[in-house]
Amino acid sequence: MNKIKYISVKETAKRWQISERSVRNYCLQGRIAGALLEGKTWKIPSDAKKPHRKTRHTAKQDTLLSFLKREKEAGLKGGIYHKIQIDLTYNSNHIEGSKLTHEQTRFIFETRTLGVTDDVVRVDDIVETVNHFHCIDLIIEGAHTKLSESFIKQLHYVLKYGTTDSRKSWFKVGDYKMLENEVGGDETTKPADVAAEMKALLTKYNLKAKITFDDILDFHVRFEAIHPFQDGNGRIGRLIIFKECLKHNIVPFIITEELKIYYYRGIKKWKNERGYLRDTCLTGQDLMKQCLDYFGIIYD
C-alpha cells in the first residue's frame, strides 16, 4: 500500500491557484478528502482534488457563527471554536480573580482534568471554568434569538451552578440579586428595582431597527451599572457582548489582561466620552481579526 504524501496549505494554494484562506476554508468545511489538522497546521493529500466552488448565495453562510456551530457539532480540536472556548473563558474568569492559568484552562477544556500542579487551586475556579465553557455553547446555540431576561438568567444559572455561592441562602442562582452590591466603588441598582430596569433596558435595545457596535457597548455599560446579579455580572455581560456580535455579524472581541485597565476606564467614562471603551474594544477586535484571518474566516 502506497503511503499518503501530504503537502502544506501554501503548496496547495499555489497548485490550485487560490488563496491560502480559501484552502483553510475548504479544510474546515470538510470539502478536502483526507485533510488532517495537526495542532494548528493542515496537512493535505498531494493528490487531493480542488473542490468545486459553491454558488455565491451559500457563501454568505460562512460567518464566524457558522464556523463555531459546525466545529462545535463536529467536536473539532484546534479550530476557532476550540481557541475561543479557551481564550474567552480564561480571560473573562481571570479578570474576575480566577487563579487558573491559560494552560490549566486549556487542559480542563481538552481533558476535563486539571493535570499536575504544585499550586493550590480553588474548586470554584474549576467549576466556573467548566460552567463558562457551557455558557459559550449556550450563546452559540442561541446567537440568533432575541436578547431576553430569561436567556440572561439562564446564562447566570449555568455559570454559577454548583459553586460555593449557589449554596448560600441569600445568593439566587439564575435570578436577580437580593442584596445591594457595588462595582468599582460605584453604587448599582437596588435589588427591588432591578427587574424593572432590566425590562426597560431590554425593551429599548430590542426596539432598535439595526444594532451597531456602539449599541452593544452601550447595552454592556448599562447592564454593568444595573449589576443585576449578586456575582458574575462581568462575565455574563461579556458573554452577552459576544452573543450579540455573533448575531449581528460584528467581529467579537475578548478583553485580555493587557486591555483590562482600559476596559474598566472605558466603562466608567462612557457617559461623557465613548472613545475610551470603543478604542479598547476595537483593539480586541483587531486581535480577533488576526485569528479569523489565520483560520480563513471572512468578516465584514
Image (cartoon, grey):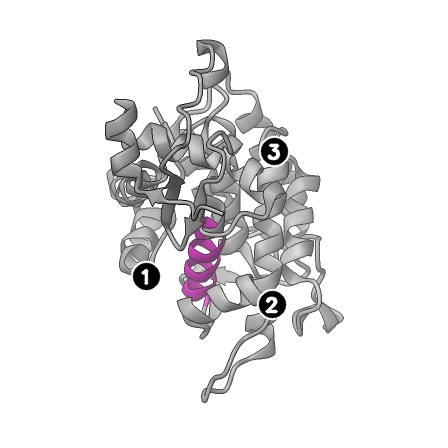
Mark toward the start of the polypeptide (2 vs 1): 2
Main SS of residues in magenta: helix
x, y percentage for residue 20? 29, 32
**Residue at 52% of width from left, 81% of height from top?**
121
Which kind of residue does numbered mark 2 sit on?
Answer: Arg
Q: Nearer the viewer, mark 1 or mark 3?
A: 1
Which kind of residue does numbered mark 1 sit on?
Answer: Glu
Which kind of residue does numbered mark 3 sit on?
Answer: Leu
Compared across the picture, whether 155 is left or right of 41 comes to right
Q: CA distance from mark 3 to mark 2?
A: 30 Å
Per the image, is 186 magenta?
Answer: no
Q: Residue furthest front?
A: 1
Q: CA distance from mark 1 to mark 3?
A: 28 Å
Query: Residue 130 occupies which quadrant of the picture?
Result: bottom right
**Residue at 41% of width from left, 59% of height from top?**
91
x, y percentage for residue 269? 30, 46
The residue carrying mark 1 is 257
x, y percentage for residue 177? 65, 57
Compared across the picture, whether 181 is left or right of 59 comes to right
Kindly state the secondary structure of the residue where label 2 is placed: loop
x, y percentage for residue 49? 42, 26
Instruction: Tell me, for residue 112, which label it has, or none.
Output: 2
Kindly state the secondary structure of the residue where label 1 is placed: helix
Q: CA distance from mark 2 to mark 1?
A: 24 Å
Which residue range is magenta in the image? Answer: 83-96
**Residue at 56% of width from left, 59% of height from top?**
232
